[in-house]
Each structure stands twice: as C-alpha cells, then as structure tokens.
Amino acid sequence: MEWQQLEHFATIAKVQHFTRAAEALMMSQPALSRSIAKLEAELGVPLLDRDGRTVRLNRYGAQFALRVERVLAEIEAGKAELHQALDPEGGTVSLSFLKSLGLTAVPDILSAYTALWPRITFQLFQDSTRMMLDRLEQGEVDMVISSMTETRKGIEWAELWEEHLFAYLPHSHPLAQQEEVQASELAQAPFIAMKQGYGLRTITDQLFGQLQTTPRIVFEGEEVMTALGLVAAGLGVSLLPDIRNPYGDQVVKRPIDGSGCVRQIGIAWRRDGWLPPAASRFRAFVLERYGRGERCATFNRSD
C-alpha cells in the first residue's frame, strides 16, 4: 500500500467522481482507476459502488475513509512540523550545557540571540559533561556548551572562553587570611568536589594529580551552588569558577597561587551530524561572538 494510493482514495471519497478526482490529482482517469483497483485488491474488499464515472462509498469504503483521513492529516501535520523545524528564523535549537554555566553565561548568550531572532525556541538540558556528550553522540541534542575536558571520536570542539577557578573557603578557615592559596594546601582540608563525569571534577583530579596528592573529599555533588552552601556552612573548601556568592562574608574567594588554574569552555557538535538551519545559525552566532578561533576534534588532555 502506497501513500499515493491513500491520497487517490481520499480524493475519490471527497468528490465521488473519477473524472473530477483525476483532474484534481492532475493525473489521467485510467491511471486513477488502476490505482483504486490495486488498493481494493490489496485490501481484499471493494470500497466503491460504481455507476459509470460516478461513484459512492460503500460501507467498507466509508469505514476505511475515516482512517485514511486521519492518516493523511497526520502526514500533513508532520510535514508542517518539519517545515517549521527547518525554518532558520523560527525553528528549535536543542542545547545541553553545564549547570554552572546556567547562572549567567548561557542566559546571556540566549538573551543576546533571541534579541536578534525572537521566533527561535530552545530545548535546554543540563547534565555532567560525560552525560551531555552521550546525548550529543546519540543525536538527542544539537550541541553542547561545556568545559573541554573530554574528547570523543566524531565530536568536534571549538573553544569559546576561559574561566579562572578559585579556592572557596569558609571565612573562619586559616587559608582565608591569605591573599593567595596554594593548591597543595587545599588538598589538606576537607574538600567539596563535583561528581565524576563533571568537568570541574576532571580539572580538580588533574590539578591534584600533577601535585601527586589526593584531596580528602567529604562531599561529591552536581551543583556548584550546593558546593558553595556547604563551604558557607564550614564543612570544607572547594575549587569553583567565579560565581555569584549569596552567602556574603561567610565565604571567601581566593586565587590559586598565580598558576593560571583555568577551565576552557567550548561548544561541541557531531562532526558528521546534520544540523537543522536554526541550530546551524545559532552555532555560527556563538562562534562569531564568543569563540577564540580555535577548533579541535582532539586535544592533549587526559580525561
């Protein structure tokens, strides 16, 4: 059974005349007759009562016509949805990003973009870097904005900006009295870390790995604001980006020994994956406004 046969039958059911139906379909009347006959043979039941070129639906045809009308309506709705999705000025962009970037960075990007293209809509997801790349590989999202701590075959990255990382300390902690903090000193205090799979955790592990030391982790979480709250409660120290501090002088932020402790934020997409026009335009906007002009599918960094 072919879609065209259903369209032919629906037109016959509507006009109930072979010649007029053939004209509406811009085909010959014999070709239309053959199409309907083939459909009836496949179904094993006549659908029409014929009187010359005039026809009417029999009870089987009337029953089948209801289903065909619904099927064709669904096809048209699907075509309309695809047309909307392919509209570069009014489609949908599916974007996954780090939770910490949801505080200011991503909202600022989306605000700037929707000011230019107000009909664009976004599907937004937040997760660990590892989970985001899983979604990207599986085609569940168009692109990812995350720390560049993991590379995979078929995923291309472009660096956007760097963020300095800081030591966050309870105000009563001895290290809070210093202008700078040594990374090795952080390892000696109760440490509040992100879970495995998050970019911040990868950077933290790399930092302490270079020092050949292991921090005393007392909490592993997913939210930087939760980590900050635990620091404010005096439960430990943490390594976090420059974020708004709602805890006032309960939390002290200090640079880390001038060593340039940073994380690279980048945008990732499937190298050979197809991007809808709206997503392609958004990626171009992000790269032009925020990009550092550096693209890499692989880079020298251990996971």
Image (tube, rainbow, N blue to C red):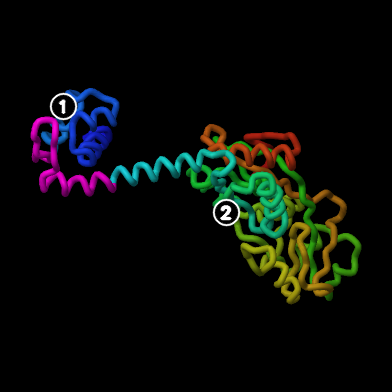
Amino acid at circle 1: Arg
Q: Is residue 79 above or below residue 25?
A: below
Q: Quadrant of residue 58?
A: top left
Label disc, if present, on residue 102 of the rendered structure? none
Total numbered circles: 2
Q: Name the residue rendered at 54%, 39% in the picture.
A: 87
Mark found first going from the N terminus, 1 or 2? 1
Magenta segment boundaries in residue numbering: 44-70
Q: Is residue 124 above or below residue 284?
A: below
- Asked if residue 153 shows in the view, the reply is no
Q: Judge depth for marks 1 and 2 and give the one in front.
A: 1
Please give the residue where the numbered disc 1 appears in the rendered image: 34
Give left or right: position of 170 versus 79: right
Q: Name the residue rendered at 12%, 46% in the picture.
A: 60
Point out residue 301 in the picture as x, y percentages from the top left corner: 68, 42
Point out residue 22 in the picture as x, y percentages from the top left corner: 24, 28
Label disc, if present, on residue 124 of the rendered structure? 2
Mark 1 and mark 2: span between their CA atoms? 50 Å
